[in-house]
Amino acid sequence: MSCILIIEGKKFDVDGFLEITKMQPYEKHFKGEKRPFKKEGKQLVYEKNGCRFELSNADFNDFEAQRRDTIKFLNKNFKKLKSIYSFGLKITEVPTISFGIENQMADFWCQTEFLQPELLKLSGDLHFGIEISLYHPAVEND
């Protein structure tokens, strides 16, 4: 998954949101549940209720396809997502559109990525944030 939507809130009614909207996340969790990984040998727990949706499964080096897929998802589900704040999510608990892209800084001295107005308007109208995480390119072993 190269682009996901993360929705989390301390009093977010995940089940209520999913039941009403009929949306299918790839993951949901509740405050106090064990996280699937440990840190420094310590079992971590979720601090908030939440769910995650796959917005794009395009390659990490295909940011154009990720943006296109994300716009399509947001347009298709706009009304459902617009209701998110009526399920206990506080206005300060901002859902995040998280893009994962390949870091090209080894090949270029500058890397810029463009977020088109339609994507910015959709995310702004929904009060969603956008983050872009750069990942080291995969190395193929011969």
Image: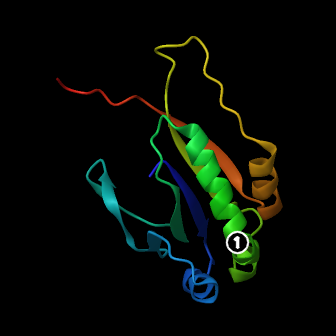
Residue holding disc 1: 81
The x, y position of residue 1, in whole percent, is: 44, 52
Q: Looking at this rendering, what residue extends furthest in the top direction?
A: 109
Reply above or below: 12 against 70.
below
Left or right of 91: which side holds 142?
left
The x, y position of residue 63, in whole percent, is: 57, 38
Q: How is the image coloured?
A: rainbow
Q: Nearer the viewer, residue 42 or 68?
A: 68
Reply above or below: 78 against 129.
below
Left or right of 88: which side holds 103?
left
The x, y position of residue 74, in whole percent, is: 68, 62
Q: Quadrant of residue 138?
A: top left
Q: Residue at x 76, y 41 (%)?
A: 116
Q: Quadrant of residue 55?
A: bottom right
Q: Nearer the viewer, residue 12 or 84?
A: 84
The x, y position of residue 49, in whole percent, is: 54, 73
Label tally: 1
Q: Residue at x 53, y 56 (%)?
A: 4
Q: Residue at x 75, y 62 (%)?
A: 92
Q: Residue type at mark 1: give it.
A: Leu
Q: Quadrant of the C terminus?
A: top left
Graded by Cα atoms within 10 Å as few (under 14), some (14 to 19) or many (20 or more), the crowding at tag 1 reads: some
Q: Does the image show residue 38?
A: yes
Reply above or below: 52 against 30.
above
Reply above or below: 43 against 133.
below
Q: Quadrant of residue 89?
A: bottom right
Q: Does the image show residue 97?
A: no
Where disc 1 sits, the SS reads helix
Left or right of 93: which side holds 127?
right
